[in-house]
Image (cartoon, rainbow, N blue to C red):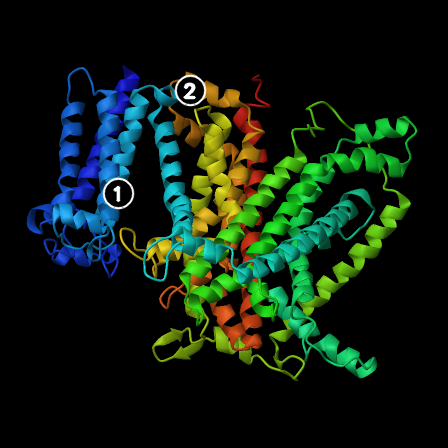
Amino acid sequence: MIALSRQSHYILLALIATGLGFVALPWYGIPSGFWSFSWLSAPLESAHASGLMQAILHGRFWLWPLPVLLVVSLIEILRRDGPRAKLIAWCGGLGLGALLLQGFAIGLKGWNFTGLESHFGPVAPQIGMGGGAFLTGTGFLLLFSAGLALKGFMRGDVFLVSSIAVVVAAIGLFVFFPVALILIEAALSAEGGYSIAAFAERLFSADVWNVAWNSLNLAIAVGLATTLLGLGFALLHKRTDFRAKGLLRLLAILPIITPPFVIGLGIILLFGRNGMATWLMSEFLGVPPSRWIYGFFGLLLVQTLAFTPIAYLVLIGVVEGISPSMEEAAQTLRANRWRTFSTVTWPLMRPGLANAFLIGFVESLADFGNPLVLGGNFDVLATDIFFAIVGSQNDPGRASALSIVLLFLTLSAFVLQRQWIGKRIYTTISGKGDSGVPARLPDGLRRLIYWTTMPWLAFTIILYGIILIGGFVKSLGIDNTPTLQHYITAFGIDWTEHGLMWSGRAWPSFFTTIELAAIAAPLTAAIGLLTAYLLNRQRFIGQSAFEFITMLSFAIPGTVIGVSYILAFNVPPIELTGTGLILVICFVFRNMPVSIRAGLAAMAQIDKSLDECSLMLRHGSLATIRRVVLPLLRPAIVASLVYAFVRAITSVSAVIFLVSAQYNLATAYIVGRVEVSDFGVAIAYSSVLILFMLLTIGLIQLGVGEQRRAGRRMAPAALGIGRGTT
């Protein structure tokens, strides 16, 4: 009876939200933005009217099924013996379906499908949906979820059912739907229709697969290089007496918070025709300047520099997790160091090596900034997609075909990785005590690690030093006169008679980037951790498929996401291009998989009996999450927030297609400076971003550390220790 009362109350709230969206809010998008509230000045005009007024005053008869379903649901909830589950679910599902159907069937020119006009006659055009349509659609989705809960799905817990429905709907709308449009766009013929022949012609053309072959070769080389170097640094950290381990951690963070193409700029400042290293080799060794750095080898070098730290962060946990007792057992059986490493240590690192290679491979395929800077005549998929959209070609069909090939390569890598790891068990930590000492590395391997990692470490330090210096000279390698002009141009501040004026050209994009990243970060963490809770704590039909679709956006390169968002959200029923909202959505669904994994890792350490105790005390799932789970997930929450914030600031491959004059981002501004060879301002801006993110991460870590220390101090008092209690 209590559960039914809660469900009825929830249904009533969903109906109120749905009715509010249909009756009180503008049905279509407002050019000046919903939050300008300009629609309040003339709420009955066609551009501002609610769904109900659109149907009554402006002849949009196709909206009438929605209030009918609302009334039926309201009558049903007032039944003395309670609402019927099947009818509530049908009303919610039909309402959501009708909303989407009319949205896709009628566009800017009336019917989107020619056959409909002959059957139903001409109709008034409609633009993209607005706040009213969004709230109404959300209400019908929640109503459908309530019907499923009434039928007993997820033990009748309406919050859990609604959470699953919202996550699936959001991923379907902002991941599956845009990517599906890429497939459709690639089949668009020159005459305006769709045909398999046009699709095959684009997809199997020689120039597309020549570019794909370039990208594949580069990605394989980068994946191998980053995996081996990352393993070297992980072993250096955990299996040697190397003392500067803090330096390793710093250099692991730097490339992650560095905009993707900045390392490429540093390589140009070193090895370009006017680079410092090029000048030294020309002066003292007689090597003439050349353009060798532009192309495959330059990209291999810069991407290895950029992505090795990520492989190191993956593999350091793998190396640390290998049970010393297993290595000791091999040595007890008289295996020498090399045999122990090759037969015990190396096989146990297999999953980590596969993950590290996969990350390097996918990151190389998706990398846009470095190929834009250093690609030269070596074309790759990411940059070719960009130029097919914004270049002189203006060929969305070709961009779609290239995106399909890029998506095929990344998904194939995921499948091959799973096949290579197989179904073997690699568990070495079972919860039992394991206090052994890790085996020493073979002498030859240890020397190889030192001889490989130390030069690379020194080269990385020199590179970042050059990047820092490049912002303080007029033109490094050409005119090395010290100057602050680049920083003044980008971030100048003037005192005027009217007060402080942010005169630097980079301030608007900087403030916009920080604002959108700050909005996207908590949304990313919230959706990711909620999804992790559903995957870790619940069991339901289709859970494996649910997990797959939540991780799919990680496998989709950013360039593909950018192109697909242009195709999906540039026309009704959902018009988002040119707005800040589309950038926030892009950030959220690009970075959500990392929040999911952080949440899963943290929840694996929290005993499920804590949740069960809360549920036995008749707290619902929402109260259990708020009072039990969230306080224990603070480290995962912080990690998700930091990662989402940093990645939103440094993202370029997806957002380069989505920025506008009003919502320009830092990385897009830097790319614009690079394209006109204004390297000084680009480097100065990048340095400010790196410093800002280092300070932000440091403050967050300091705050978390203080909270943890306070928590430890309060723990004895909270538990009653020292007061005679047990």
What secondary structure is found at the residue carrying circle 1? helix
**Would residue 229 be found to the left or right of residue 334 on screen?**
left
Which mark is on residue 615?
Answer: 2
Q: Are marks 1 and 2 in contact (CB under 8 Å)?
A: no
The residue drawn where x is 13% and y is 55% is 46
Number of disc labels: 2
Which mark is on residue 179?
Answer: none
What secondary structure is found at the residue carrying circle 2? helix
Q: Quadrant of the C terminus?
A: top right
x and y, in percent, of residue 10 in the image: 26, 28
The residue drawn where x is 39% and y is 47% is 174
**Would residue 311 be found to the left or right of residue 641 on screen?**
right
Q: Which residue is mark 1?
A: 100
Q: Is residue 476 above or below residue 163?
A: below
Tell me if I can see residue 246 in this picture: no
Q: Label 1 is placed on what type of residue?
A: Leu
x and y, in percent, of residue 260 in the image: 57, 61
